[in-house]
Amino acid sequence: MPVVWAVTLTGILSNTLVAPALPEIGEHFGVGAVGVALVVAFASLPGVVVAPVIGVLADRFGRRTVLLPCLALFGAGGAVGMVAPGFAILLGGRFLQGLGAAGLVNLAVVILGDRFEGMERARAIGRNAAVLTVGLGVLPVAGGLLAQVGTWRLSFAPYSLAFVVALAAARVLPPDRPAEVPPLREQLSGARPYLSDPRNLAMTTVGFLAFLLVFGLGLTVLPLDLDRRFGVGSATRGLLLGLPALSSVVVSLRIGPLTQRHGTWRLVLWGFAVLSTGYAVVAASPVAGLVGFGTLLWGLGEGLTIVPLQAYAAGLAPAAQRGVVVAVWVAAVRAGQTVGPPLAGAVVSATGTRAAFVAGSVAAAAVAAVGALGYRRRVR
């Protein structure tokens, strides 16, 4: 469904477009690494609280009814950020974007989960993830070019496309309010067994850790590292930020067969091991070209980690509780997106960009090792 894909792409615009321009934003407003990290974090912060609420509303009143206001908020926040005269107003615009973004990628996954079952659901979500990863490859390049041609403000211009997507969604997606909406207490009680399921708890914990690393290192530290260590411009930074999508899209397109053959959790553990290797390569890189190889590696790790978790979340609960379960998972990953950038920024301020990648490599390896021990015990 092209409209669902467009919603997904809109949901990832918030950080992919501005990431290449982060050094220029920091210089313009006179803020350091932690301040730059807040530009990334504020677009994720609202989702920690709002995403579960959006899930409840989507289950009660329908996916389209909740989706359209989210798209409008996202576009409005982008407009505020583009013209922000001060850093506080810029953060306010980013927060508004975060309110809207809290209901985009997760509702796209829920809509696909409603329409497909079993391996077909995994394939559909895999295709949606492939579109997402292509966007992750193209959008940073576009954002970097816009910043280099104009200023960092120009990289905010494409956020207005959210209004176009809202119009298309209003026209194409059918009204889907449930015929009988159960009382709120009953709806939440119905979701409780799925939310307390140990598999769900493991899924949300691993999702939090994965996005903490991806947003902390990939979208916050990498642009600073490329600027400080190698002195490359915003266009080149955008190109290198987009490289992980090339390897991640390969996994996304094959996620159905891979999941069927190896299982979700084995893929996820492999993903963290590959992430660890990619971060280590970047930390050790003496030239920017080798950094590109490291980003390709961690893109493969992202595909093996994030895409299976999305499909797992969509299939864990029936349709009546799917929005809540997926939204809770999204809240967990939004928490990772929010905590990761400031944490990484603090590490950069204290020890430098290279040390941040070393720390990320160690953390990803630790998750893989602990997860592998738990997986073997469960199999036994």
Image (spheres, rainbow, N blue to C red):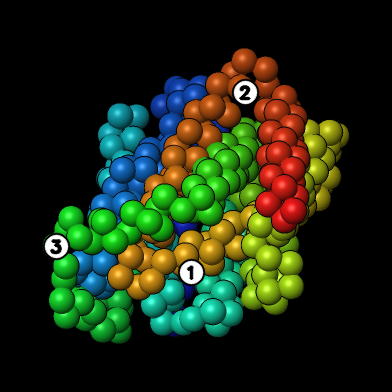
136 left or right of 155 in image: right
Element marked by disc 1: helix
Query: Between marks 1 and 3, how big is the CA–CA gap?
Result: 24 Å
Label placed on residue 84:
none
Say which residue appears at 74% left-offset and 43% top-offset: 373
Please say whether residue 229 is visible from this viewpoint.
Answer: no
**Amino acid at pointer 1:** Gly
Q: Position of residue 77 (x, y in %)?
A: 29, 49
Q: Position of residue 66 (x, y in %)?
A: 23, 65
Q: Position of residue 82 (x, y in %)?
A: 34, 46
**Amino acid at pointer 2:** Val
Figure check: 380 above or below 322: above
Question: Mark 1 vs mark 3: which is more N-terminal?
Answer: 3
Label placed on residue 183:
3
Say which residue appears at 83% left-offset and 37% top-offset: 285
Please say whether residue 199 is visible from this viewpoint.
Answer: yes
Say which residue appears at 26% left-offset and 56% top-offset: 189
**Dividing the image into 4 quarters, which one contains the N terminus?**
bottom left
Q: Quadrant of residue 164?
A: bottom left
Q: Quadrant of residue 212?
A: top right
Q: Which residue is mark 2?
A: 348
Q: Which residue is mark 1?
A: 315
Figure check: 377 above or below 175: above
Q: Position of residue 110 (x, y in %)?
A: 39, 69
Query: Between marks 1 and 2, how big is the CA–CA gap?
Result: 39 Å
Q: Within 10 Å of the Cα at label 3, are there few (<14), some (14-19), or many (20+) other Cα atoms?
A: few
